[in-house]
Amino acid sequence: MATRAIEIENAKTGEVTEAAYEHPLIVRLCHWVNAISLFVLVGSGLQIFRAFPSFGAKIPQQNLIDWPKSLAIGGWLGGALQWHLTFMWIYIGSGLLYLGYQVFSGNYKQVLFVPRDIPGVWPMVRHYFFFGPKPPATEAYNPLQKHAYTTAFVLGVLSVLTGIAIWKPVQFSWLAWMMGGFHYARLWHFLLMWAMIGFIFGHLVMVVLHGWNNFVSMLTGWKKEPEYPAK
Amino acid sequence: MTSRLDARKFKRVNRRELLKLTPIVALGAFAIPKLQAPLLKAGLGFSDWASAKLFRHGHLAPTFSESELTPFAKFPINGYDIDDPEVDLENWNLAVSGDVQKPGAYALSHFKQLPKVTQNTRHVCVEGWDVIGNFSGTRLSDFLKMIGADLNARFIALQCADDYYESLDMATALHPQTLLCYEMYGQPLTREHGAPLRLTIPTKVGYKQAKYLTELKVTSVLQRVGYWEDQGYSSFYGL
């Protein structure tokens, strides 16, 4: 996947460096809207969970965990539901905008994990976790990255679908039925949240490890000195 | 083809690209105390509007077999303040008013004369728990037709014996599974479950299903929505 690239010339020193345009505006907008939405959805979701912190019967009630109120958003169940329902629309909206843009612009090819990427996953895992040699970078995202981002998108879609099954178990009874009923849909929704939190944790670790230029690229779109041949 | 750019010009390009992200700052409005409540109210209102659009009269809530029922002893009570508002069951009646041809006081016998419906449906609480119960009663739609209610009115307003109050949109009121319930698990309602008459609405969340009903008013204008709704819960909350 060819990325738009330029050469930057420092007029004083004559030094020439490269920069690649990695993230189109819509992708950057959706990324940050998503980041804020997920923060609110997780925080308010945990406050909603506090109203019945169990996946068993109401009688007798066995609480799974006593999640601290200070690590939740909304103050009480009604407030948390307001936050959750409001940002649900923002999250879905930005998700649809992202999906539509990626499909119609063809930009999805940069990030979608496809069977061709499978052989490249193991060398990346070996490099990151087992001190293996660094595989040469050939494009903006390495196979493991593509796998992570594609998985995160799927997690987001499943979070929305399980959420709809909880919110509308009658109007979307077929959706709730596919998930094993309202009761299980609620459990899947909860587990998907933790999977997403796991992704975000790994994502943030990688952002820290990959330095400033990489972080700035999600703000301006341009990555200075990319580690792959940008032309 | 790779174009070449002066480093200072590249900085300007970067700044411009960064500025294009400013629409995100709009989300910061949620952090401003004065704007937060109206924004969240708008979000909730939009959700309620969408919920009403999604509601389908002919779409029935799932029903369940006897073996799937939650045992009666494990059906939660969840009174909002008191379990027993000490309703005088002997002399109870439902005061009907508003846009109806036959207002007045209706004793329990009136409800029992109408066709009896029994259903095993899921009761979902806003807190997140759910149970499957056995409910018998008469369709609210049958009762509304009996009293000559104006079915073009928008709401049914309900008062309960324990100061709890509720309201229901007409579409849900006319749904075939919306019952004025006087029996659970084949027995007359116990006081904790809302004797002598309560609402059972499998297309609504639990707090909409008011217990110990005392007054019913057909109206297009609501003075107040409901005990919890007026504190910030969803007005429609259809499942």
Image: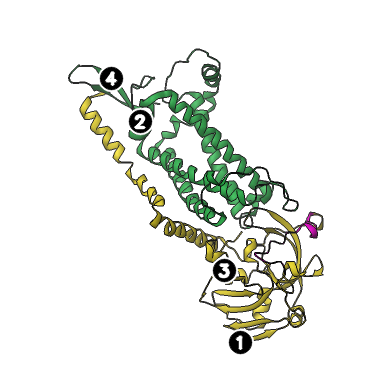
Chain colours: A green, B yellow
**Is disc 3 surrounded by few (<14), some (14 to 19) or many (20+) residues within 10 Å?**
many
Asked if disc 1 and disc 2 are in contact, CB closer than 8 Å, the reply is no
Residue B102 point in image, percent of width and height: 63, 87
Q: CA distance from mark 3 to mark 4?
A: 65 Å
Lateral position of residue A178 relative to residue A228, left or right: right
Residue A216 - label? 2
Q: Secondary structure at mark 2?
A: helix
- Please state the horizontal and vertical placement of residue B2, each as a whole percent of the image: 27, 23
A188 or B1, nearer to the observer: A188
Image point 73% across, 83% down: which residue? B107
Query: Comparing marks 1 and 2, which lies closer to the viewer?
Result: 2
Magenta extent: B68-83
Query: Which of labels 3 and 1 is toward the front?
Result: 3
Residue identified by numbered label 4 = A17
Give SS at disc 3. Answer: loop
Q: Are marks 3 and 4 in contact (CB under 8 Å)?
A: no
* Residue linked to disc 3: B226
